[in-house]
Amino acid sequence: MLVSFKWLQDYVDIPWTAQELAERLTMAGLEVETVDSLDPGLSQVYTAEIAAVEPHLDADELNVVTVSLGDRVETIVCGAPNVRVGMKAPLALVGAKLPGGVVERRSIRGTVSGGMLCSEKELGLGEDASGIMELPNDVGVGMPLVDALGLDDQVLDVAIYANRPDCMSMLGVAREVAALSEQELRYPQQEFCESDRKVTEEASVDVEAPELCPRYSARVIRGIELGASPVWMQQRLRAAGMRPINNIVDITNFVMLETGQPLHAFDYDTLAESRIIVRRARHGESFTTLDDIERTLTSDMLMICDAEGPVCIGGVMGGANTEVHDATRNILLEAANFSPVSVRRTSRALGIASEAAARFEKGLDPQGTLMALERAAQLLASLAHGEVLQGVLDENAVACTERAIALNPQHVNDLLGTEISLDTMTSLLNRLQLTVDTSDTPWSVSIPSFRGDLELECDLIEEVARLYGFDKVPLEVPTQAVTGGGQSAKLTLIDGVREALVGAGLYEAMSYTFESRQQLIKLGLDHVTPWRDAIPLLNPLNEEFAVMRTTLLAGLLSAAARNANRQQGRVHLFEVGPVFHAASLPLETQPEEKEYLGIVLMGDRLPRYWGEEPQPFDFYDMKGLVELVTSRFSAVPEFRRGSHPSFHPGRQADIIVDGLLVGRLGEVHPDTTTAFDLPNRVLAAELDLRQLTEYPPAVAWYRPLPRNPAVERDMALVLDDSILVQDVLNLLRKSGDETLRKVLVFDVYQGHPVPDGKRSVAFRFVFQGDRTLKDEEVARELKSMYTRVKDEFGAELR
């Protein structure tokens, strides 16, 4: 927000320069980004009055103009089309330095010109070059233009955060300055005389959508005289970055900048039946706004209507059908409070950005409508000679209840590490217009309606701190017990997983937590619980981001497809991120958020080199990565045959830890591969990190080099195809005594002479003890293990 230093002094005495004020506001939480001077450096430029205009005798498009500077006159040759007698305009005398150069005395077609009547563009004050700049009638003659237009001013560009809409006004900033400087805040004049005619007899207001318009206030002013605004008001508007238009529009803009409450003036005579109806737009309804663009509306937009139809889009822009124009004599002045969400959505949907919408979007004080309305009525009565009808139309659905926050003064010093006295605390809060009841502990602090950002005790402590001065807060650690910073042990474990996978040659991917339902169909999960119960968004950006994701696979497979489309055939990605599952839909309880790990492999294991055959990724590459991940935890995984719809039915496995399902891995189902437009076979895995992080991190341990030799033996068993090799491995490992170190599978064979429906699986056993083992001991142990497998699975020695 642009804040004029001179205008600010209308409301509070400022004991600092503009630069010093900027520093103090920034330290108090209102960041001042720049301090700029409005002075354009114009010298020898004065206000002048056109005394006579005569055609140039030797040039059809030029005039010889006599201008008065009060104490002398000058003859100027001018070609501006708008020059006329009685007009006041800026005159640059000989020697004046303008943005385009120095003004010289020149002879034009035989007539000597003693200066130049200037346009806005020639002075560097605007872009209008269509004619000379017309000054207000009440400006003095012969004054330096910088003084006449108030250009000897400095403007502070203040960054207003979303939680402080009260500071999007001159009064709001002045309130902060008054608190910082311990000066009195001066409110603008609001006194005026009302006529005997009652407003309730001339107009009516009916709010049909109070959820979108909690308060609607209006006044009727008759007999206004449309014209230019006074110089002081034009100066204020220009300093704030607004262009003066006429006294009616300028007053509504001025009051908005002054109080923060947007206003809108309707031509009263164009309102059908003198009625205002506040309702939702009808779907497909059309409306032409002030910029002469016809817009199509939706039912979630708020409209201000008369008895026949829309006249304004609530909080966004007025309509061309009730616009104030040169013939306007009577107006209905609106000051309303609109839903910030509704205004934001409507403004974005229609592509309309305005100063009013920017304020409504942040949420305004509903109690501020009347103050702004009274201030505008006072200015209209005094500057436009309007007759203000008696009374206010005020439809108010907001309960006027006083808010109070409990504040324990000891908590202030405990949190800040300060020793602020109780009297100082109450003084600081009172300077912010917060009333403090200190009769009991905790204190009760009454919150004014314009401070909607104050909700908790910590908010009040922050107010004390910023007014006391953050630079006065000690640098020592507070005496109260504080907890150490840093991330949790679980997050550290997950970071370890990331490091391990990056070390294995994978790249980390990041995808959106939103996805489309089409993705679930591609994965074959649209009818499978819990994935099908994806949580829909109330306001999705588009159909591609319509639901919260229930799996990481869709994002990773989409990333693999994008890589493949760009001739990147080797893909090895992983992602760590949340997935969301709902207990039921529609939501009745908070959805469950789980941290998952997803991995995708596609293409060759290594880059292709001459002399080497391609080695595509296979199931065991993915299994090795899963084991690498679980090795970070004290969890031992088992792999069992799975039935997940997204994976190949015969090439997938469930990952089990202590009887619990913690993830899945395998080759992606061919239908899913086709749906995602993937050219090759893809391996994927997904693990629930939330379950894995329940296990403590794996501890590295040391085993001394063995002193005795190991004994290796092989055994080939014929098993039914239906028997899982993992189950046989588990049984063999359990059956062995303390000398059994390893059991590995090193060969699987099917074909002659192995019978149909069976396969030969070769196991390698490694034995090692604290002494040299004898062949008889090893043979006895092998026989015992074979007997167990034969009894359990019907295995036969090959």
Image (cartoon, rainbow, N blue to C red):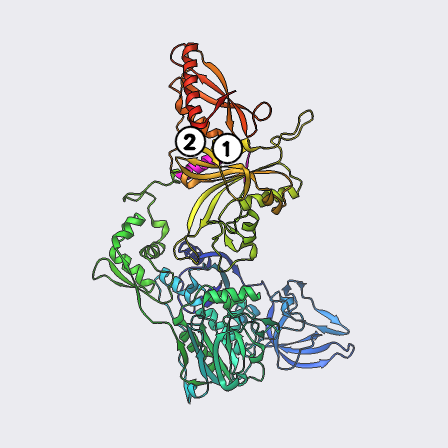
Residue nearer the viewer, 624 or 370: 624
Seen from the viewer's position, the closer of residues 402 and 776 is 776
What is the crowding at mark 1: few (fewer than 14 residues within 10 Å), some, or many (at least 20)?
few
Q: Give the x, y percent position of residue 739.
A: 40, 17
Residue found 67% across the figure and 82% down from its top: 52
Label drawn at residue 722: 1
For this orientation, the residue located farthest to the left is 439
Q: Give how far across and how far down residue 689 sits, in percent.
A: 44, 40
Residue 229 in view, yes or no: no
Q: Tell me how many marks there are.
A: 2
Disc with the residue nearer the chain's start (2 vs 1): 2
Looking at the image, residue 754 lies above or below residue 388:
above
Q: Height in image: 164 above or below 599?
A: below
Q: Is residue 282 visible?
A: yes
**Which residue occupies 46% across, 17% down?**
766
Q: Which residues are magenta?
A: 490-508
* Above or below: residue 785 compared with residue 282: above
* Residue positioned most to the right: 58
In the image, taking residue 78 as reference, residue 225 lies left or right, namely left
**Considering only vertical position in the picture, is 25 above or below 350?**
above
**In the displayed structure image, the side of residue 736 where residue 556 appears, left or right:** right
* Tag 2: amino acid: Val
Which of the pair 268/277 is nearer the observer? 277
Q: Residue at x 44, y 24 (%)?
A: 790
Q: To which residue does mark 2 refer?
A: 636
Q: Main secondary structure of the magenta part?
A: helix
Disc 1 residue type? Ser
| Marks 2/1: CA–CA distance | 24 Å
Q: Is residue 305 magenta?
A: no
Where residue 678 sits in the image (x, y, percent)?
63, 43
**Secondary structure of residue under mark 2:** loop
